Image (cartoon, rainbow, N blue to C red):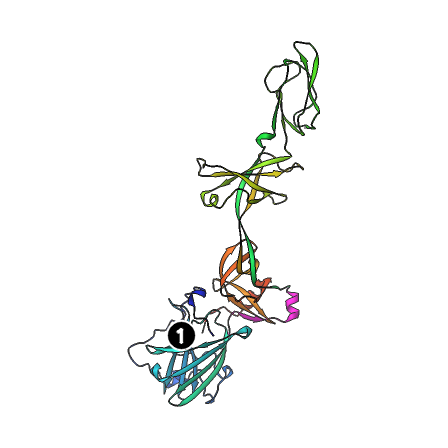
Amino acid sequence: MLNSNRTNTPKLVLPFLLSAIIMSTPLIWSTASFAEGGHPHDAHEATDGEHAEDAKGPNGGKLLTDGDFSLEITIFESGVEPEMRVYAYHDQQLISPTELNLEVDLERLGGVEDSLTFSSESQYLVSNQTVVEPHSYDVHVKARFEDHQYQWQYDNHEGRTQIGERQQQLAKIKTETATSKKLVLTSALFGVVSTPEDSVFNITAPYAGSVTKIHVSTGEAVKRGQTLLSIRNRSTLQTYTIKSPVNGEVSERLVSFGERAETQPLMVIRDLSRVWVAMSAFPEDIEKLAIGQAVTISDMHGHDSAMGKIEYIAPQMTGGHIARARVTIDNAEGHWRPGMHVQAQIVTNEETVALAVAKQAIQTFRDVPVVFAKYGSTFEVRMVELGMDDGNYVEVTGGLAADTEYVTDNSFLLKADVMKDGASHDH
């Protein structure tokens, strides 16, 4: 049965019925215009092949004719969810919808059949169910008027194409099954690399004296226990040495040969085996952040990356309405240099959704997002309503049934094939 819950269909308001609906007087047209494109049909059943493609009624709908009786079938969606409206004519004159008994079945791909029932409204019958997108189906019509039974069937296909298996392989078309997925939601921030506060070592002389020798240069890598300076003790006149307390790099040399060594720093050693990344978060981002969230740091060229966790979020904003958050990352190979600008992807939430599709599968059709469902060698658009997006998969909240096989790779080729014949929304 057709799903009558209209909140689950894509919100498409695409008015395509441009003819005015005359509400106050009976509708009459000439025999010549009535017969244009129409042909008599068997009293029991008529097929689409017997209809001219341009057989249109006064309201722009599909015109089905059997002798002196006709139905005009339209899909109306201007300001409402798509609904089927059917006008009936006898001897070329509009008849009251209360005189007509009507059943319409829409046979869709995948063995889905929507059975429509109707109610009388003004000068037409209107379906009690929403005609969900896409409006692509084989139509079976049964009508009863004045003890006469009429039947028609025709196809109304849109957004549909057929590609053989060999062509699918040549086009490298790949598919997946639409199922539940765990989405890993992230926020993207920018940051700057800096030296951790506890990794900066100011080298001073334990005893006042004068510098007799400097053993290392600025920028030189040093090992823990390596000799840095030789100092002659002012009191004992004995020479002693100062050694590096850590593995690191000489970032500053603040003394020269022969200078007095008092209490001032003589040299600065920085241990850059790990570094901080100070990230800038705007107000819309800061509420998503929490201590312990996983962070991936990447350089601006995307060549290198490192992992860490948020360990600090500043309690106040800067003058530019930015909050600072901090992560520590490994820098054993020395790639991350203080002052370097980086990108940060922070995992702010992980949520399992009932249905999701690969982001690369999404195309547009009539300005709405779609994926191409696969039924053997036939492909057809499915208008989808989308929700959360983790960059790889997108939640689907409507328009696609679970376990549907859909195209992930090269779906743009299917769109091009559909669009080459035009993407009109004619019913």
Vertical comparison of 263 with 219: above or below: above
Q: Position of residue 360 (x, y in %)?
A: 57, 58
Residue sticking out furthest to the left: 24
What is the span of residues highlighted in magenta in the rendered image? Answer: 157-171
Residue 164 belongs to the span the image colors magenta = yes
Vertical comparison of 16 with 209: above or below: below
Q: Label 1, on which residue? A: 128
Q: Residues within 10 Å of mark 1 (few under 14, many from 20)?
A: some
With 159 as the anchor, is 238 left or right in this view?
right
- Quarter of the view holding residue 406: bottom right
- Quarter of the view holding residue 130: bottom left
Q: Secondary structure at mark 1?
A: loop
With 18 as the anchor, is 382 left or right in this view?
right
- Residue 274 appears in the figure: yes
Q: Nearer the viewer, residue 148 or 54?
A: 148
Q: Position of residue 338 (x, y in %)?
A: 59, 34
Q: Residue at x 49, y 80 (%)?
A: 154
